[in-house]
Amino acid sequence: MAAFRSLLVVGLLCSLALFLLTGCPVNPPNGNEGEGEGEGEAAITEGEVILATTDFSTNTTLVAGTYFANSDVSVSAGATLTLLPGVTIKFASGKDLEVESTGKLSAIGTASRPIRLTGQESTRGYWGGLHFNSSNSTVNRLEYVTIEYGGGWWDGNLDLTGSTSSPSRVAVQHCTLRESSKFGFVFSGTNVISSFTANTITSNQLGAGRTTAALVGSLDTASSYSGNDTDVVSVDTSGNLDTDTTFKNIGIPYEFPGDFGVHAKLTLSPGVRLHFGPSKDFSVYSDGSLSAVGTNADPITLTGVEATRGYWGGLRFTDSNSPLNRLEYVTIQYGGGYWDANLFVTGGSTSPSQVAINNCIFEQSKKVGFKFDTYSDITEFTGNSSSGNELGAATVAVNLVGLLNDSGPYSGNDKDAILILVSGTYLDTDATWNVTDADYQFGDDLRVTASLTLGAGTRLVFDSQNEVTVGSTGKLVAVGTAASPIVFTGLTQTAGFWGGLRFDTITVAGSTLDYVTIEYGGGYWDGNLFLAGTWSASNKVTVTNSHFASSGSWGIKTDNANNINADARTANTFAANVSGDVSGI
């Protein structure tokens, strides 16, 4: 039987060689001459055949059977290679199947009679893989095809390359891509995935696949991408994203080995996970937008490949003034390795970044959880939390502190602080600062030229020599309670450590301090509380039930008795002020 089989293969090889030289059809060994033929094409019949050709340059159909490819196989010159149900091609070590720019491949099997492209040995990377090279034909179709043991030349069992002017085009349905020494599939350059439906990508060494950002949206949720050595789809970001795209939840993470820039409309579906490489970042630019709307049950996660603070750069919106920008039920973690936060919102005076942020978690940043600079337009901010971060919960521009209108939590950080970004600017818009479970911490002077209201229990902490000035058009309403006083204090508890609170020639009535503690000030002004200049008694500051302690000079000093309520000395308490309790009353 073995001798007969060898003679049969030799006979088929000779017949195939004759066909390649003459264009005549091969006579099948089972007597079914012409099976699978069509006009202008030759049929290689059922049985085991060693493929002698290296270039299918005329239309050819392979019918059910096992074929051995001992050299590279290509499809070119406008030819179509058709693989019928039941075809198996076994490739020798390092060999591949390439569909060139002028070639086409139709491989349509069935569930009961799939097509199989495999190695002559069942070893990962044994053969090169199937490669479409700028073949832009609607004929290209893979259905019920198993491609296995490839990746020995190309980076995947199925590899597509193309360019803007000459993309590769293919439909992939009900296929199995497995046991690659690299990826199951690779879509690089510019390609068109006509459909990608109900495929199984498993048991591949580097991951399910690698694709450009623009083609991530081609991946369907009915396919299975798990069971690989590393369950990821790697996203090639060399060209960034300039096509509107939706990243679907495919059950495994999308991994970004490079920086990811968005210059189009990007939508992340509930449950999507994006994993970023070391020091890499995610930026949404002026011509891009990001809608990442998860759910409580299926949050969206942006994280590092490794669970280490600062492992990746973070998410940044820069000059992206789009109403589409929205983060809901998004967890951002292990960032702050390039930007100053897990989430950084920035812009310019004419192009602020606009983002709605609700029910998000910012955690384990190398710096702060989130940062909003002066030119940020945060349209919604509710139900968010920031904890487990190294430098604090957040950095927020002074004009945006009023956004923090929920309870967080903002505690549980290495430093339980919200850093206030002043940078020489004034608080010139009426604002209410609500109490949080973290301190408002200042590294610069605070200038108030509008109405500022502080909620009961609010704590303001100042660095060395920093001070607060309420200008002539400003008003401060700080009304605490006996149980929840408002506190102005120093970062270091030393008399005179920070400058103090000053009211300067007030022209607006209504400033009130009640149940307020001011301590460790007087390091710049002449008191923890300093009322400078002379103004109308109708504009006086009312100070009651408050405590002034450990000033580097006076507890309270005023330039004119009209500036403060007459009973300020007795309506408040004092302790350990270097120059004395009250001056000027």
Image (cartoon, rainbow, N blue to C red):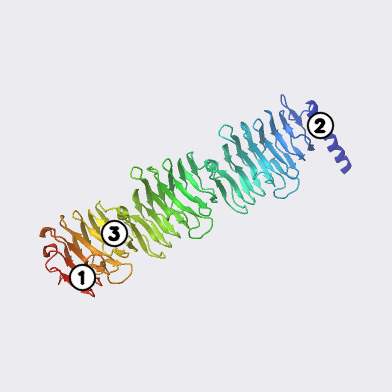
Amino acid type of disc 3?
A: Asp
Name which of mark 2 and mark 1 comes first in the sequence: 2
Residue at the extreme right of the image, as rendered: 3
| Mark 2–mark 3 CB contact (< 8 Å) | no
User: Mark 1: which secondary structure?
Assistant: strand
Image coordinates of residue 330 in percent, x first then y, are 44, 53
Q: Residue at x 21, y 62 (%)?
A: 502
In the drawing, does residue 574 fall left or right of residue 149?
Answer: left
Q: CA gap, disc 2 to disc 3? A: 88 Å
Task: Tell me the tag on residue 273.
Answer: none
Q: CA gap, disc 2 to disc 1? A: 106 Å
Say few, some or many: other residues with alpha carbon within 10 Å of mark 3 (under 14 / 14 to 19 / 20 or more).
many
Amino acid type of disc 1?
A: Trp
Residue at label 2? 17
Residue at the extreme top of the image, as rendered: 39
Residue at label 1? 554
Q: Residue at x 15, y 60 (%)?
A: 533
Q: Does residue 196 lie above or below 343 as drawn? A: above
Name which of mark 2 and mark 3 comes first in the sequence: 2
- Of 25 and 578, which appears nearest the observer? 578
Q: Does residue 236 lie above or below 462 as drawn? A: above
Residue at label 3? 445
Q: Residue at x 70, y 50 (%)?
A: 124
- Of 20 and 112, which appears nearest the observer? 20
